[in-house]
Image (cartoon, grey):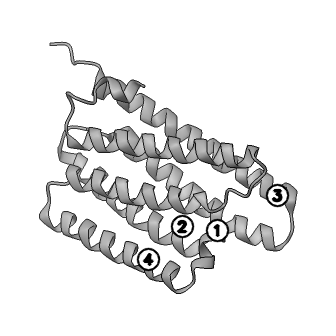
Amino acid sequence: MLLLKGFSSKGKPFKIFTLYCLAMLTVQLASIIVVRMNFENLFLSHFYFGLQFLILSFFYYYLMKDHFQRKIIKISLIVCLAALGIQYALDWSLFFKFSLLEIFITSLPLIIFATFHLYNLLNEEKKYYYITTGLLIYLFGSTIVFLTANLLISLKSRIAFEQIYNLNVYLYVVYQLFILYDLRFVLVPKKV
């Protein structure tokens, strides 16, 4: 609700980030509902990773002023979405499986875009600094969590899997706190 407060008066990156937060909330709520109905919710992870990649790519695209960085975002967006599309077109059953490739090709470009943004902030106003920092912490951590989770599943170590999953939840909470902290600067008018 806090994001909707400044929606109409803020720029395009803010609106895109608000859309991202609403999309992630929708996927998470759908995931909870599906689990409570005693169904497998793994297929929703594909929406989570895909939407996160798509929306945050546009978020960083509109934050970038450098033409070369924008070109990298465009190319990455096309290549990654094409790779995912081809993968699922060739074997649609992958939609119901855990995909390490998907996690990797949707997280790595976002890490690069976020790093570009932090680099650009060295000489600019620190706009979306904490959101970007939180995203980097979350993406690095969650990528490692998901890559090791697949190994733990194959080893049938349920306790270790639950602990590693809980680590991902904690990383996400930290990311949300970074977002909340950054919104303080975006939504609260500066005193003159």
The C terminus lies in quadrant: top left
**CA gap, disc 3 to disc 4?**
32 Å
Q: Quadrant of residue 133?
A: top left
Q: Are marks 3 and 4 in contact (CB under 8 Å)?
A: no
Look at mark 4 in the image and give the residue it sits on: 85
* Image position of 79 with respect to 68: above or below: below
**CA gap, disc 2 to disc 3?**
20 Å
Q: Position of residue 76 (x, y in %)?
A: 32, 72
**CA gap, disc 1 to disc 2?**
8 Å
Q: Position of residue 170 (x, y in %)?
A: 64, 42
* In this picture, residue 143 sits left or right of residue 124: right
Q: Quadrant of residue 113?
A: bottom left
Mark identifier at residue 147? 1
Mark identifier at residue 103? 2
Circle 3 Cα neighbour tier, 10 Å, few/some/many (<14 / 14–19 / ≥20): some
Tag nearer the camera, 3 or 4: 4
Mark 1 or mark 2: whose residue is earlier in sequence? 2
* Image position of 68 with respect to 65: above or below: below
Q: Residue at x 26, y 74 (%)?
A: 75
Q: Are marks 2 and 3 in contact (CB under 8 Å)?
A: no
Q: How many marks?
A: 4
**CA gap, disc 3 to disc 1?**
13 Å
Q: Residue at x 64, y 68 (%)?
A: 147
Mark identifier at residue 160? 3
Q: Looking at numbered disc 1 in the image, what kind of residue is underneath it? A: Leu
* In this picture, residue 12 sits left or right of residue 137: left
Tag nearer the camera, 4 or 2: 4
